[in-house]
């Protein structure tokens, strides 16, 4: 069985949905995981914000605008009056459900239910299209088998058991459609896997179903060696290891959600990144294989805050770093990078939510400096410590870029540097010229 996940742009219009229907027709069993149509989740977030603020008139206007968009999709997607009527009634039901919150109390629980409507709509409309064209398929409600526990982590045993039970209801079917992103929490309420979670859904479903392959279909032909939005002459990478892909996803490669690599890695299921606009393109295959001794790609992560703690108490002291890290643990704030000297430690975070509380406690240890508007640039490949030259290529390329921090040796897959965000484009361009274009010229 294969898992095929299609993102918001891949199902973002009637025409795109028709293209997806062509891509999924196969003799092999498939579970197709769909995101909400592009733009829908953002609009639902805006509606929720208005509902929180009791701005019900503004919320109704946004709801009407989104409803109108879906009415247009119905007109363009179906040819028979029967399906148009069925789809129109379906979307009216969903938007009446959302509108009901303008008359009632609105809390975090209602917000999650509202945010789930995008995936529920896209999968239902797609299922109707398959039915209209006599393509045998079954709509599997993700809320029947996707679940997170009290720590907001996937309940893998529950997912595997209940997905199997759902599939066993339809022994003669090979094509299944389900929602990405949405799930139930430990209390049985509608919840989600956070933004970008449809990739995560696909990987969790793939692991639960012991899939032969997980395909992530987007609007770009695989993971590129650099950010194509700001750097010219990038190209898709043919092969990546699970660890390399995880590093790139975490440090800014937008094509893949950072969490989505781990379930596939644990079950050793290859993940293929493909382009719905160019379905014949090779894309990127992520597996347990890697090409040794090569630099694969560069990614950048913005919104980083650097914190430097300077204290004489560090000198020859044990337990100092533990005490510092415990502060971040209490505020559930992950640390990205860390460097140390005898009397100072510098570290970075990407979530400033509890920054002021953290700083108030850290100041008890010594002098504290904070730099905001920082970017981590991550160079990913196979950097075996015994092999010389890899680091030289990276730092030669960055010789004109001021470096705030350097992390090298913590992983065989990653050299990371911290720079001012204002230097990001120059850094990515320099790395592209110094590493990849030089390699191509010497090939």
Image: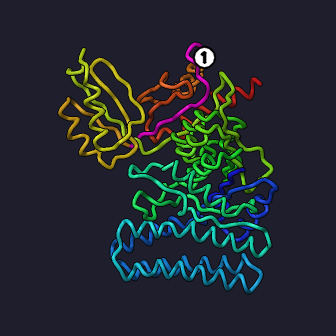
Q: Nearer the viewer, residue 81 or 54?
A: 81
Label total for image: 1
Q: Is residue 289 above or below residue 235?
A: above
Name of the residue lying farthest toward the left: 364
Q: Position of residue 257 (x, y in %)?
A: 55, 47
Question: Which image quadrant for residue 340?
Answer: top left
Magenta-drawn segment: 373-388
Q: Position of residue 189 (x, y in %)?
A: 43, 64
Tell me: 112 left or right of 224.
left
374 in magenta: yes
Residue at the image point whose x is 41% and y is 41% from the top: 304
Q: Quadrant of the C terminus?
A: top right
How crowded pointer 1 is (Cα within 10 Å; few <14, some 14-19, many 20+) is rated as few
Residue at the image point whose x is 45% and y is 41% from the top: 421
Residue at the image point whose x is 52% and y is 48% from the top: 157
Q: Is residue 382 above or below residue 316?
A: below
Q: Position of residue 361 (x, y in %)?
A: 21, 38
Q: Nearer the viewer, residue 253 or 374?
A: 253
Label 1 belongs to which residue? 389
301 in magenta: no
Residue at the image point whose x is 70% and y is 74% from the top: 128
Q: Nearer the viewer, residue 116 or 15?
A: 116
Tell me: 1 left or right of 255.
right
Question: Which image quadrant for residue 380?
Answer: top right
- Judging from the image, the colouring scheme is rainbow
Q: Is residue 151 above or below residue 136?
A: above
Q: Is residue 351 above or below residue 59?
A: above
Q: Position of residue 442 (x, y in %)?
A: 75, 23
**Which secondary structure, mark 1?**
loop
Question: Which image quadrant for residue 234?
Answer: top right
């Amino acid at each position: 069985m294969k898992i095929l996940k299609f993102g918001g742009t891949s199902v973002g219009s009637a025409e795109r949905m028709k293209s997806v229907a062509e891509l999924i027709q196969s003799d092999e069993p498939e579970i197709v995981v769909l995101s909400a149509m592009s733009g829908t989740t953002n609009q639902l977030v805006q509606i929720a914000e208005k509902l929180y603020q009791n701005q019900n008139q503004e919320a109704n206007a946004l709801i009407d605008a989104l409803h109108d968009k879906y009415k247009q999709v119905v007109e363009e997607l179906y040819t028979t009056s029967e399906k148009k009527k069925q789809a129109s009634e379906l979307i009216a039901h969903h938007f009446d459900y959302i509108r009901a919150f303008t008359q009632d109390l609105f809390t975090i629980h209602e917000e999650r239910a509202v945010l789930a409507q995008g995936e529920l709509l896209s999968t239902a409309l797609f299922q109707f299209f398959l039915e209209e064209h006599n393509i045998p398929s079954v709509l599997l409600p993700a809320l029947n088998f996707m679940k997170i526990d009290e720590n907001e982590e996937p309940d893998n045993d529950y997912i595997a058991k209940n997905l199997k039970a759902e599939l066993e209801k339809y022994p003669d079917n090979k094509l299944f459609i389900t929602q990405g992103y949405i799930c139930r929490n430990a209390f049985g309420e509608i919840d989600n896997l956070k933004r970008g979670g449809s990739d995560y859904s696909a990987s969790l479903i793939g692991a639960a179903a012991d899939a032969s392959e997980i395909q992530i279909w987007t609007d770009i032909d695989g993971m590129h060696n650099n950010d194509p939005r700001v750097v010219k002459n990038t190209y898709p990478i043919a092969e990546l290891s699970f660890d390399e892909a995880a590093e790139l996803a975490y440090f800014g490669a937008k094509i893949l959600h950072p969490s989505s690599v781990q379930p596939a890695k644990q079950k050793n299921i290859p993940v293929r990144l493909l382009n719905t606009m160019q379905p014949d393109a090779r894309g990127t295959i992520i597996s347990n294989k890697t090409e040794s001794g090569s630099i694969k790609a560069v990614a950048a992560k913005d919104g980083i805050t650097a914190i430097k703690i300077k204290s004489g108490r560090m000198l020859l002291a044990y337990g100092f770093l533990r005490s510092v890290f415990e502060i971040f643990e209490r505020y559930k704030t992950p640390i990205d990078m860390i460097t140390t000297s005898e009397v100072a430690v510098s570290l970075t975070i990407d979530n400033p939510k509890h920054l002021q509380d953290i700083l108030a406690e850290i100041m008890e240890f010594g002098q504290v400096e904070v730099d905001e508007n920082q970017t981590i640039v991550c160079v990913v490949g196979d950097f075996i410590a015994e092999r010389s030259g890899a680091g030289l290529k990276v730092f030669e390329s960055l010789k004109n870029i001021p470096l705030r921090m350097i992390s090298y040796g913590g992983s065989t897959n990653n050299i990371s540097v911290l720079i001012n965000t204002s230097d990001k484009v120059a850094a990515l361009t320099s790395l592209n010229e110094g590493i990849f274009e030089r390699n191509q010229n010497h090939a």
